[in-house]
């Protein structure tokens, strides 16, 4: 994944969300509640986790944008910088099994359609921030991620896309075990 602009990040988010929604629509209510052999989460739990993380990322990006807007001095904006090291680490995590922090552990009680609605609400929140994100220097403001360290708002947004792709792939594998 290469991102040369905020527009690239948003375009990826749109494509990822379209794939997520189409896949979610293919899962029956019965399938969503099955705990497949060797798994710790049901499909319902995977989607709930994705929505919890999306909510958190929206909150983080809102905070970073607000901080950057306060510090704005009218200088020219630097190009969007997503380091190759960050992307390489994301790619490593794509195939790793990580333990989700408590605040984004699923309850297992939220339906996939409800989780998809929450995912859509979070993406709409990011879309509402687009103008601010595109006109603000976000390069000097960071919030730490538990595994990745300090990230800028654009890096959090790239992470959001990668996180969703990773868990949709996980959900596809789970559904394969169920069917």
Image (tube, grey):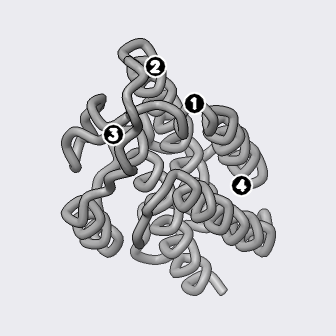
Give residue 133's position: percent from left, percent from top. 53, 36
Identify the image quadrant of the C terminus: bottom right
- 2 or 4: mark nearer the eye: 2
Residue 88 or 48: which is nearer the viewer? 88
Q: Tell me the CA gap for discs 4 and 3.
A: 30 Å
Residue 68 or 176: which is nearer the viewer? 68
The tag on residue 69 is 2
- The residue located at (44%, 55%) in the rendering is 158
Q: Tell me the CA gap for discs 1 and 3.
A: 14 Å
**Label 1: how many Cα within 10 Å (few below 14, some 14–19, many 20+):** some
Is mark 2 in CB contact (under 8 Å) with mark 1?
Answer: yes
Residue 162 or 178: which is nearer the viewer? 162
Q: Tell me the CA gap for discs 1 and 4.
A: 31 Å
Question: Which of the two discs, 2 and 1, labels the residue nearer the N terminus?
Answer: 2
Check disc 4 and report the residue beneath it: 112
Q: Tell me the CA gap for discs 2 and 4.
A: 36 Å
Question: Which of the two discs, 1 and 4, labels the residue nearer the N terminus?
Answer: 4
Q: Tell me the CA gap for discs 2 and 1.
A: 8 Å
| Secondary structure under the numbered disc 1 in the rendered image | helix
Q: Tell me the CA gap for discs 3 and 2.
A: 14 Å
Compared to residue 151, the image places residue 27 above or below, namely below
Is mark 1 in CB contact (under 8 Å) with mark 4?
Answer: no
Check disc 1 and report the residue beneath it: 132
- The residue located at (46%, 77%) in the rendering is 37
């Amino acid at each position: 994944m290469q991102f040369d602009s905020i527009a690239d990040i948003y375009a990826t988010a749109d494509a990822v969300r379209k794939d997520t929604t189409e896949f979610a629509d293919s899962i029956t209510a019965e399938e969503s509640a099955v705990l497949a052999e060797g798994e710790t989460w049901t499909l319902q739990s995977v989607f709930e986790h994705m929505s919890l993380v999306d909510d958190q990322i929206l909150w983080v990006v809102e905070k970073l944008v607000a901080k950057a807007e306060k510090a704005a001095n009218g200088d020219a904006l630097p190009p969007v910088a997503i380091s190759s090291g960050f992307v390489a680490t994301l790619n490593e995590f794509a195939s790793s099994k990580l333990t989700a922090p408590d605040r984004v552990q699923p309850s297992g009680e939220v339906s996939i359609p409800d989780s998809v609605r929450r995912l859509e609400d979070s993406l709409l929140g990011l879309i509402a921030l687009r103008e601010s994100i595109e006109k603000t220097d976000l390069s000097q403001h960071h919030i730490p991620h538990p595994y990745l360290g300090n990230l800028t708002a654009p890096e959090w947004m790239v992470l959001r896309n990668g996180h969703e792709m990773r868990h949709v792939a996980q959900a596809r594998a789970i559904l394969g075990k169920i069917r």
